[in-house]
Image: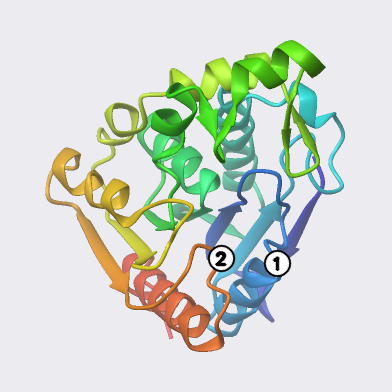
Amino acid sequence: MRSTVHIPDGGVATRLPTVVFVHGFSNNRMENRSFVQMSRLLESSGIASVRFDLSGHGESDGDFFDVTITGEIAETRSVMRAVRDFDFADPERIGLVGMSMGGVVAGIVAAEEPGISAVCLWSPAAVAPFEVGSGYLKGRDIAAEIGEKGYFDADGHRMSPALVEDIAALDVYGRSCAYAGPVRIVHGDKDDIAPLSYARRYLEHYDGNVELEVVEGADHGWAAVPHRTRLHQSSLQFFRERLEVRT
């Protein structure tokens, strides 16, 4: 897996709070530059970060056809363990950001991998198991397309039968809710990819440790400058507080 590391000036001499980013379905560690912008904001506030490409994405090895969510969870857990051993990272102050399907992965990893101090989920695609489980994705018959081609064409990516089964069986809320640390979910009310109602369901499963920030007018990809700015500033404030940034 390929990655990019951001270390604030003077960070090598001291242990720093560090945030790991998990990108969305068929995306990469830039996440349409949103992750880059966020990493630089964190860096300016004394917080290190690590952005990585999951297998079959971006510059990392592997083929998208071999991707499963189970595999992405395992890879992210492996990255978290590696980051804790970096000489600049404070293992007691590790945060996690996940965007869209990466938000689903991040929520589960936080519950199943010890030592994560704070989690921020951007537009988590908790709808995915319900949508894929219905047999249709983007209005198309998944089984029929796989029967014809051997894969489902997901925006130019070959989605395998194994990935379809993996997503459909995923217990998003049940596997996430064991995490007891602070969680902030930031979601737009105009998200037509991952409806806001599925983000609200997280509130029913966590034990009072989650806050949902709804941004009026924001879409799934945070495509407008004011919405993206709000997303980044909210996340920065969250991590500065929860990772106890020392100024």
Q: Quadrant of the N terminus?
A: top right
Residue identified by numbered label 1: 32
Q: Nearer the viewer, residue 126 or 52?
A: 126
Answer yes or no: do the residues labelled 2 and 1 have beta carbons within 8 Å? yes
Q: Is residue 155 visible?
A: yes
Residue 208: x percent and y percent? 12, 50
Which quadrant of the structure image shows residue 76?
A: top right
How far apart in space, not on screen, are marks 2 and 1 (Cα)?
9 Å
**Count of numbered circles in the view:** 2
Disc marking residue 221: 2
Quarter of the image with the C terminus is bottom left
Q: Secondary structure at mark 1?
A: loop
Q: Earlier in the sequence, mark 2 or mark 1?
A: 1
Q: Is residue 124 left or right of residue 84?
A: left
User: On the picture, is 5 further left or further right than 110?
Assistant: right
Which residue type does callout 2 highlight?
Gly
Q: Amino acid at mark 1?
A: Asn
Give left or right: position of 154 versus 39: right
Residue 17 pos. (x, y %): 50, 64
- Colouring used for the render: rainbow
Residue at image point 47% right, 21% down:
168
**How many C-alpha atoms fall within 10 Å of the one at disc 1: few (<14), some, or many (≥20)?**
some
Q: Which mark is residue 242?
A: none
Q: Is residue 5 above or below residue 204?
A: below
